[in-house]
Image (cartoon, rainbow, N blue to C red):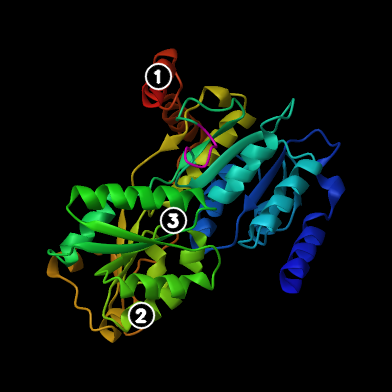
Amino acid sequence: MLRKTLLVLIVLSLLMTPVALAQGDGKPTIAILRFGRTALNELTRTGILDTLQAYQFINADERALLNAEEDLEGERINIIWGNGGMDLPTANIMVENALDRGADILLPLMTPVAQIAANLTQDLEQPPLVLFSIVSAPYTAGIAEAPCIKPAHIAGTQARVPFEQIVSLLRTQQPDISLVGTMVNAAEPNSVNGVEQIIMHSEALGMTVEAAPITSLPDVPVATQTLLDKGVEAILISGSSLEVRGTPSIVEVASGYGIPVFSPVVGNVNLGAHVGAGFNDFYREGVVVGRMLTAHLERNIDISALAINALPSLGVALNLDTAAEAGISFSEELLSLADYSIENGASTQNRTPPSLPDIPLEERRAADLAFLAGIECTPERIAEEQAALDAMEQ
């Protein structure tokens, strides 16, 4: 408890300096707010900054400052940073602080921060824009009801985890599998949604799912053992932050039984997961939000008229080292699907940093506005989505 209290106080003190940055200079102030620093949301952050730089809202010197996550009082825009340290109370303080500092636009990364931002701004008379990314379940989280049925000040992009395809990989690895284990953290909407998706798609393939509840990190290895005691033949985690952080302990316990661990976070193979399969275009998440942001800054779009974006993406990675330690052999079909693997401590992942195409600004602007026009909330789309929601309530 003392450690968490100190963490909150330290983060709060960092977030509160300098308060004057976001106030009084007439330039828009953007708050980039991460639930915690990960390699995946680092890609999203890079996509946002690349887009801002391509549109000349930040220059090369300002970009160097932002790469170090230092607050910027720039020539055209101000940027302030927040990091919730993977802790909900700290994340709540982070968002409140951004509002206190007069942020005009909030860019929350990951579901918990987007949910907090939506909740804290919903009753404000003049709320800042909220443009979220890396949110797998915006509707379960209460951020919106449907892509176009949402608060006027909110838009963003959904990292739609392709659970149907992920669940099918269980059969690709073990054709006769019948019992799958997972975990659910009721406090995380993406976890609740993930378990619902896992159950639905597993049952469609004739499999049964056992779900063990977790509420804190120490629960994770206990839940893993509970699932193993019930005879699960594979563990597919729902994607909660607790499971992601607890991946090494899940793998350690499951490997003793020769049970494979599947994660919907591709990069979790670096934490030991035997199979990582899930949404894998986090740079694009940043670029999409960057398109929305720059079009708003240039007064070319009305955020209230934009639907929540969602584009499919599936990546597959295998950890051959931890699989070998567990006595697990991957099927030839699963091996053929892998985008990269880890073997003998080395990864075959392409480490070339993603980047925007080098094209003239006018050409980029035309392409980006065409993309945004494709997710416009037309009256017909709004009516269709509302009718679908009404039908679900009947």
Secondary-structure class at tag 2: strand
Q: Residue 166 placed where, x, y %?
A: 28, 55
Secondary-structure class at tag 1: helix
- Would residue 49 be seen by someone viewing this image from the given angle? no
- Would residue 281 be seen by someone viewing this image from the given angle? yes
* Nearer-the-camera pick, 354 or 180: 180
Q: Residue 50 placed where, x, y %?
A: 55, 48
In the rendered image, the residue lying farthest to the front is: 230
Q: Residue 193 placed where, x, y %?
A: 42, 47
Q: Name the residue under label 2.
A: 346
* Label drawn at residue 354: 3
Question: Mark 3 or mark 2, which has the lower sequence index?
Answer: 2
Mark 3–mark 2 Cα distance, whole angstroms, equals 21 Å
Q: In this view, does 168 lie to the left or right of 27?
A: left
| Three-letter amino acid code at the position of disc 2 | Ala
| Three-letter amino acid code at the position of disc 1 | Arg
* Label drawn at residue 381: 1
Question: Mark 1 or mark 2, which has the lower sequence index?
Answer: 2
Secondary-structure class at tag 3: loop
The quadrant of the picture occupied by the C terminus is top left
Q: Is residue 257 above or below residue 153?
A: below
Q: Magenta region: which residues?
A: 139-144
